[in-house]
Amino acid sequence: MVAVEPENFMEYILVEHRWIVVLTALLPISMLWKVWSTVRNYVVFKLSSAPKMHDRKVKDVQRQIKSWLSGDRSTRLCTARPTWQTMSYRHSVYKKTFTNIKINFVDILEVDTENLTVRCEPLVTMGQLSRTLEPLGLALAVVPELDQLTVGGLVMGTGIESSSHIYGLFQHICLKYELVLADGSVVTCSKEENPDLFYAVPWSYGTFGFLTSVVIKLVPAKKYIRLQYHPHNKLSALADQFRKESESDKPHEFIEALLYTKESGVLMTGDMVDEIGRDGKFNPIGKWYSEWFFTQVERHLRNNKTVVEYIPLRDYYHRHTRSLFWELQDIIPFGNHPIFRYLMGWLMPPEVSLLKLTQPEAVSKLYEKAHVIQDMLVPIVHLEDAIDTFHKEIEVYPIWLCPFRVFNHPGQLKIKTTADSQMFVDIGVYGVPKAKNYETIPSTRRIEKFVSEHDGFQMLYADTYLTRDEFRQMFDHTLYEKVRESLPYCKEAFPEIYGKVNRSVRK
Ligand SMILES: Cc1cc2nc3c(=O)[nH]c(=O)nc-3n(C[C@H](O)[C@H](O)[C@H](O)COP(=O)(O)OP(=O)(O)OC[C@H]3O[C@@H](n4cnc5c(N)ncnc54)[C@H](O)[C@@H]3O)c2cc1C
Ligand SMILES: NC(=O)C1=CN([C@@H]2O[C@H](COP(=O)(O)OP(=O)(O)OC[C@H]3O[C@@H](n4cnc5c(N)ncnc54)[C@H](OP(=O)(O)O)[C@@H]3O)[C@@H](O)[C@H]2O)C=CC1
Ligand SMILES: CC(C)=CCC[C@@H](C)[C@H]1CC[C@@]2(C)C3=C(CC[C@]12C)[C@@]1(C)CC[C@H](O)C(C)(C)[C@@H]1CC3
């Protein structure tokens, strides 16, 4: 472990015993925030006030942009969402120098139960959506699993989940975007209307305009997920089954795998069902006292038996929220202890935003040197090679594996095939690297090189060390540039994507 020197007593507590602050302050505040926002969202929905307010809020964004237009336009524009509230590890320093546009868009506007769509505002979170849709027997086709991810962030960045091998990324289930552009106009775009803009918006990181609403595709939901755990002790066997299941003509609705060592892991296949069958036990993994999901899965590996469980739908969707995958074990080391779970589990997890807000400089330095948070997206055929490379360069376990389809659409994600789509795998690596030769920048750059050479992509909520040229090689900028040229004031108002994601603007 790399040593860091705390500068004062408070910092010492925050670094060495971060759990004290988390337990005494962050967890209670997080709970109050959760209760307040749930009640507030419920009341707003019941009063049906959100759709009426929406137009007024859009006009307010237009007003702010027009005021920027009538000034000297010496600054650029970004959203005023404080950087500590976002679901990335870093703070975006450009927020300090750009003109901040307030976007207070936090509501679900309309659920169309006939056409199976939901129209919602960009700050609506995944937790809010799944809570609202469940009683209606509906769900988003892709539910990125951390409660606090927002629709806007997932559209402008990207979103992925264990149903993505069928439906694709979050962008692929979005049917329409409404944006306010740099000239103050409001546009809507879809496959039929302004298609260039529609295909260029995902992965654009807010560099065309401000998203004000999105129409998203829904699917009928059932009460439970029948989840089958398939333990493996050979990577090649796990990878073969992983590919076979993902590319099958009739795939299971949910597929993911967790690797616990280079050679061993558990593949999980799931389907929605209305009844609990007799072939497995009921496991409400979302209850406050239940063990963290990733350690439950590890037990199936140790037992080395294929078993079936029935998990309540929302518990499944947010299965990695309570332990923030496995990141919370570094912050609350005893968080998975039964005594803690029974007594305090109902307060978990702390809000990521509050953790971020109270992160001292010394912890940032520690994470910088000895912690990896990366999701690399590579064609599924290269799965074993990628695991080899990650093992050699980083050696962090568990590793999250999630298959997903990239459709052959125009835009920044250009796949190298003429087929309709190509199957990829997201390799998520979060934790303290054990590889002896690990050094943040050189090791990450070698991984990035591997991903580029294998026609893959890097998720950009994480740190990227790509140069601008390498970045433009990884992400196709042809359509992006064309649309930027065609929109009045766009280039003046917004930097290019690299200008918002490179390391020099993220501290
Ligand atoms: C926290 C929470 C959030 C909910 N969110 C939604 C939701 O977003 N959409 C939904 O259909 N049901 C939602 N429901 C369920 C809803 O309240 C009703 O249970 C169900 O829709 C039956 O409505 P009703 O026939 O009693 O008529 P009403 O409640 O009077 O509504 C008639 C129809 O209009 C739609 N509707 C009403 N208000 C809104 C709104 N603000 N936004 C979108 N559609 C609205 C609904 O489709 C509803 O069926 C929510 C429930 C909870 C607890
Ligand atoms: N399972 C998954 O798929 C997971 C995904 N993630 C990643 O987390 C990120 C989402 O986090 P979240 O906190 O929700 O989003 P952020 O607030 O971090 O926003 C991400 C980007 O989207 C832009 N943006 C957000 N809302 C708007 C809007 N209304 N109009 C214009 N631009 C907007 C932001 O611009 P600006 O800088 O101007 O605010 C920023 O560049 C995504 O990048 C996603 O890939 C993380 C964990 C899991
Ligand atoms: C595509 C998928 C599934 C991505 C999962 C990404 C998660 C593992 C990321 C998203 C936000 C994230 C970067 C975060 C952290 C860990 C990894 C997270 C949870 C933590 C909690 C680590 C500890 C840090 O002190 C701090 C609190 C700033 C961050 C906050 C964001």
Image (spheres, grey):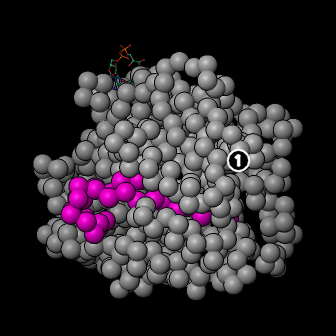
Q: Is residue 228 left or right of residue 220?
A: right
Residue 102, relative to residue 337: is it above or below?
A: below
Q: Few, some or many C-alpha atoms within 10 Å of disc 1 (few <14, some 14-19, many ≥20)?
A: many
**Which of the 4 quarters of the picture holds residue 410?**
bottom left
Decide whether residue 481 is among the magenta residues.
no
Q: Is residue 24 left or right of residue 492?
A: right
**Amino acid found under the numbered disc labelled 1:** Leu
- The residue range painted magenta reads 403-431
Q: Secondary structure at mark 1?
A: helix
Residue drawn at the location 37% of the way across and 27% of the way down: 220
Q: Evaluate whether residue 489 shows in this view.
A: no
Does the Cβ of the disc 1 residue fall within 8 Å of ligand 3? Answer: no
Residue 386 location (% of width, % of height)? 52, 70
Residue drawn at the location 38% of the way across and 83% of the way down: 470
The residue that label 1 is drawn on is 301
**Which of the 4 quarters of the picture holds residue 196?**
bottom left
Q: Front-most of 375 and 351?
A: 375
